[in-house]
Amino acid sequence: MANKRNLKSAINSACEEMFIECVAVSLYGNNRDGAETLLTSIVKLQSEFTSRISHPEPGMPAKVYFKKLREDFAAQANELIDQINNM
């Protein structure tokens, strides 16, 4: 398992890349309202998962918890990426 600092850094980097891509798409597209909604979702995703790293669920083994956290993040990030691509 990677340490918490590396995991937070990876989440922040992924969210930063999604944010930049969404801004770029919104500048060249017509759907600014949809872009604002996606930008808000990206910021919420980043905030939620970085706070989940700092406060793991009690009673759950760390290895299982962080594996589930990575899977949940990947699923939600892929969903947001699909929405950005469809703008």
Image (cartoon, rainbow, N blue to C red):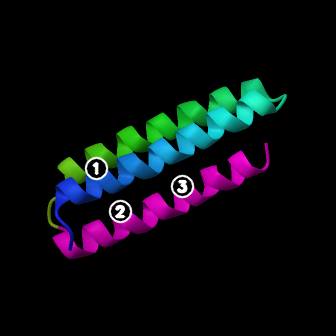
Dot 1 or dot 2: first in sequence order is 1
Residue marked by disc 3: 77
Q: Tell me where the magenta segment starts and ends, as one range.
A: 60-87
The crowd level at tag 3 (other Cα within 10 Å; few <14, some 14-19, many 20+) is many
Amino acid type, label 2: Leu
Residue marked by disc 1: 52
Does residue 45 belong to the magenta stretch?
A: no
The crowd level at tag 2 (other Cα within 10 Å; few <14, some 14-19, many 20+) is some
Label of residue 69 in the image: 2
Dot 3 or dot 2: first in sequence order is 2
Disc 1 from disc 2: Cα separation: 8 Å
Q: Residue at x 27, y 58 (%)?
A: 7
Q: Secondary structure at mark 3?
A: helix
Majority SS type along the magenta span = helix
Dot 1 or dot 3: first in sequence order is 1
Disc 3 from disc 2: Cα separation: 12 Å
Q: Quadrant of the N terminus?
A: bottom left
CB under 8 Å between callouts 1 and 2? yes
Q: How many numbered circles does the render carry?
A: 3
Amino acid type, label 3: Ala
Camera-side residue of 21 and 32: 21
- Is 85 situated left or right of 57 in this image? right
Camera-side residue of 8 and 28: 28
Amino acid type, label 1: Arg
Disc 1 from disc 3: Cα separation: 15 Å
- Is 76 situated left or right of 69 in this image? right
Q: Considering only vertical position in the picture, is 26 above or below 70?
A: above
Label of residue 67 in the image: none
Residue 33, how many percent across, how many down? 74, 24
